[in-house]
């Protein structure tokens, strides 16, 4: 009997080792990625460096026309046996491009939403551009009841490359997505379908200039995440900047032209009607940039972002039924496209600015 028990124990041990070995082989890169997760502040703000394959080339072959299809792809290719994601970047927000007194190009951004768990994501793919980007972890189920504070709770962070909201790559191209409610887009021309946040990942990984980003977007069928419309602002290290909109399923490009800056909030710039909201924040931004001829220091850019901050309770006049009643500016970021630096503050704490570099 003892021999049988020992033999069974040996077999169980071998099987356990095999399971662990196979599991480690399957998730080695993913585990390395999750081991980089660091809590930077109690806002909360986290940082992560992606060290595994997120299969963007595979995504670009077949694409995804809906959030569910994107979730299925991410689950199958990255999360594997773990639950799917949601990816609906519903928020207010403001962006603008400008130049510093040293003639360096910057792009600034406010992300406005309900209180969020914020994540800085570094991606360093072998065959694409390195980048740093911002993710709102509320879009993958994090919040007061769940934080990425244990290995089990970190798993869905692996979806982060596909839910980027703004960022900059090593070539000095920066971008951000902003809500424009009325301009929902679902193109269906036979090209590869992509969703809102996945499109931003594609641009960060493969585009060095605004022109390249526009050309890439022309090769795909764009599909809004959720039921909300969006537009993008994209700026590159040469100072070129454009806002990309989709009007009646047709892509429209608003260029900086001869202006010294370009700004966007939550209304269309390419239509006579200027449909949407955020016009008061837009006026704050353009008035200040006009006053300075589009030339601001990084500190002054943060000041503009502060003046254009969003407060849903104030904007609603106390109406709790207002869609964005509980929303405030969650992060403010200034990307220096010449120096390839990112300066970030969260929760309107402009006395605590975190700085990162893309190399």
Image: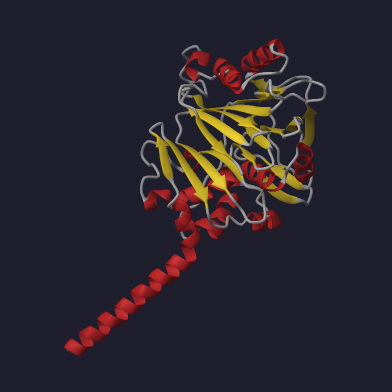
Task: Give 99 or 142, whichever is nearer the viewer.
Answer: 99
Q: Residue at x 48, y 48 (%)?
A: 157
Residue 324 in view here: yes
- Specify how the rendered protein is coloured: secondary structure
- Give the residue at the far left of this rendering: 1
Task: Give 321 or 124, whichever is nearer the viewer.
Answer: 124
- Residue 272 placed where, x, y %? 79, 20
Which of the 4 quarters of the picture holds residue 243?
top right
Q: Residue at x 79, y 43 (%)?
A: 215
Which of the 4 quarters of the picture holds residue 77?
bottom right
- Residue 103 placed where, x, y %? 72, 25
> Is 94 rendered above or below residue 152?
above
- Residue 203 placed where, x, y %? 69, 44
Residue 180 in view here: no
- Give the residue at the far right of this rendering: 258
Would residue 48 be found to the left or right of residue 167 on screen?
Answer: left
Q: Residue at x 79, y 36 (%)?
A: 250
Which of the 4 quarters of the picture holds residue 115?
top left
> Is 208 rendered above or below residue 345?
below
- Residue 208 placed where, x, y %? 73, 42
- Give the residue at the far front of this rendering: 102
Q: Residue at x 51, y 40 (%)?
A: 120
The quarter of the image holding the N terminus is: bottom left
């Amino acid at each position: 009997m003892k021999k049988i028990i020992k033999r069974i124990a040996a077999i169980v041990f071998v099987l356990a080792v095999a399971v662990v070995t196979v599991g480690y082989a399957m998730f080695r890169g993913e585990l390395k990625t999750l081991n980089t997760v660091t809590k930077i502040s109690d806002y909360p703000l986290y940082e992560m460096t992606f060290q595994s394959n997120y299969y963007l080339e595979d995504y670009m072959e077949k694409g995804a026309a809906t959030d569910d299809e994107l979730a299925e792809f991410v689950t199958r290719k990255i999360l594997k046996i773990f639950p799917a994601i949601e990816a609906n970047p519903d928020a207010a927000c403001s962006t603008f491009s400008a130049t510093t007194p040293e003639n360096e190009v910057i792009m600034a951004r406010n992300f406005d939403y309900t209180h969020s768990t914020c994540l800085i994501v570094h991606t360093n793919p072998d065959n694409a551009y390195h980048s740093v980007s911002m993710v709102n972890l509320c879009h993958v189920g994090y919040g007061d009841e769940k934080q990425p504070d244990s290995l089990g709770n970190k798993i869905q962070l692996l979806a982060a490359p596909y839910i980027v909201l703004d960022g900059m790559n090593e070539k000095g191209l920066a971008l951000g997505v902003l809500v424009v409610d009325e301009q929902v887009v679902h193109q269906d021309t036979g090209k590869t379908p992509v969703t809102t946040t996945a499109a931003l990942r594609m641009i960060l990984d493969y585009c060095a200039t605004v022109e390249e980003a526009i050309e890439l977007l022309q090769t795909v069928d764009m599909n809004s995440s959720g039921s909300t419309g969006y537009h993008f602002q994209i700026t590159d290290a040469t100072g070129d900047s454009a806002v990309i909109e989709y009007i009646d399923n047709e892509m429209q490009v608003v260029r900086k032209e001869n202006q010294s800056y370009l700004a966007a909030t939550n209304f269309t710039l390419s239509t006579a009607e200027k449909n949407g909201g955020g016009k008061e924040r837009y006026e704050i931004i353009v008035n200040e940039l006009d006053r300075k001829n589009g030339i601001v220091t990084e500190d002054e850019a943060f000041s503009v972002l502060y003046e254009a901050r969003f407060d849903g309770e104030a904007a609603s006049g106390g109406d709790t039924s207002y869609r964005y009643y509980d929303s405030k500016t969650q992060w403010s970021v200034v990307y220096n496209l010449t120096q390839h630096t990112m300066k970030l503050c969260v929760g309107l704490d402009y006395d605590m600015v975190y700085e990162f570099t893309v190399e």
